Image (spheres, rainbow, N blue to C red):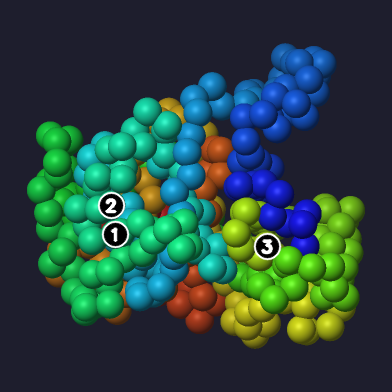
Amino acid sequence: MPWATQHPFLNVSITPIECSVVCSKALAQEYFAPVIAQTPKRKDSNGDRATISVEDFVVISVEGEGLDAGQRVLELTSPLALAGISIFFITTYFSDYILVPAKARTQVIRALEERGFAFEKSTEAYTNIAAHHRNASSTSSFDINPPSTPPPANVSELSARTFSLLRRRNIVPHVHRDIRLIQCAGRRDSYSNYSAQDLALQIGLTKCFVHPPRFLSLTLTGSEAPSLLLEKSTLPHFGSDDVLLGSKNDYLIPISLNLAPLPFEATGIVCGVAGKLVGDGSGQMMEPVEMSYLSTARAGMVMVDERDLDRAIEALNRGEFGLEVV
């Protein structure tokens, strides 16, 4: 599967809000910049014209082992949010990826290592050594002082301020009940050689893009098989069940946050949302809601299990700064 491993990192996400691409700067300049330059800007476009980020970002990979997905989101984003670092976050089948401004790379690595994450050369990813010895339901580790002096002192306060900001900007979570997603991936044993499964995966992806989906996220890296978040209705495009790893019967429902009203460098959004759903140490949380997260250029997509959707909506509504979910 050479086509799937020729890029260090590539994510293409199509959501009800936008199409977003994360790729190398060289690819962006070669393929996207010329097209954008030749596309006339309409007077009524309201900022919908395609753009390329001016700031450079680096990708940090964290292996998804030792904690539930939602707990990992909170563990990874809380030290960065408290340090005032703007991030993008992508949950995939195998790993979590944090996109941070290149200028903040050293600060991010220091914050992760102080939280118990260590770089493993064998996997070229960070792993959380402490996670294997921590009670996953404990939230005491989130009540930490920030390394600098940002306004929030802990995750509970940060979550409250995040939701206050969302309310002031009239950003309302939207539940897409008619979209049922599957988190899946290609098979590791076939991504180094061409095989029938590899061909079926390529054909399936081509069919997905030829018939524009309402939701699809594809992540390619240099070391892992392709990871996909796609609509259940598109599974027949891939033929037999053995082409894709992952449960075909556990459905995720996306909850979207259109973050276009916020500045591009806004911080604390991912952590604030995770704090509401997973628990922020405030002692006011019911049973944690399992979640995963997908950042795109101007939006945040929260995925929750179909069976947990009502509890997720209740959690987002709760408290003084709760949001009315539509």
Name the N-terminal-most of marks 2 and 1: 2
Going by the image, does 144 lie left or right of 171?
left
Q: Can residue 237 be seen in this snapshot?
A: no
Going by the image, does 322 lie left or right of 223?
left
Front-most of residues 131 and 19: 131
Q: Determine whether label 2 and label 1 are within 8 Å by CB.
A: yes
Q: Residue at x 62, y 30 (%)?
A: 25
Name the N-terminal-most of marks 2 and 3: 2
Front-most of residues 62 and 316: 62
Q: Residue furthest front?
A: 122
Q: Residue at x 75, y 73 (%)?
A: 190
Which residue is the site of mark 1? Answer: 117
Quadrant of the snapshot with the N terminus: bottom right
Say which mark, if any, is on residue 112. 2
Which residue is the site of mark 3? Answer: 226
Element type at mark 1: strand
Residue 208, position as x, y percentages in the image: 83, 59
Going by the image, does 159 lie left or right of 199?
left
The amino acid pointed to by label 1 is: Phe
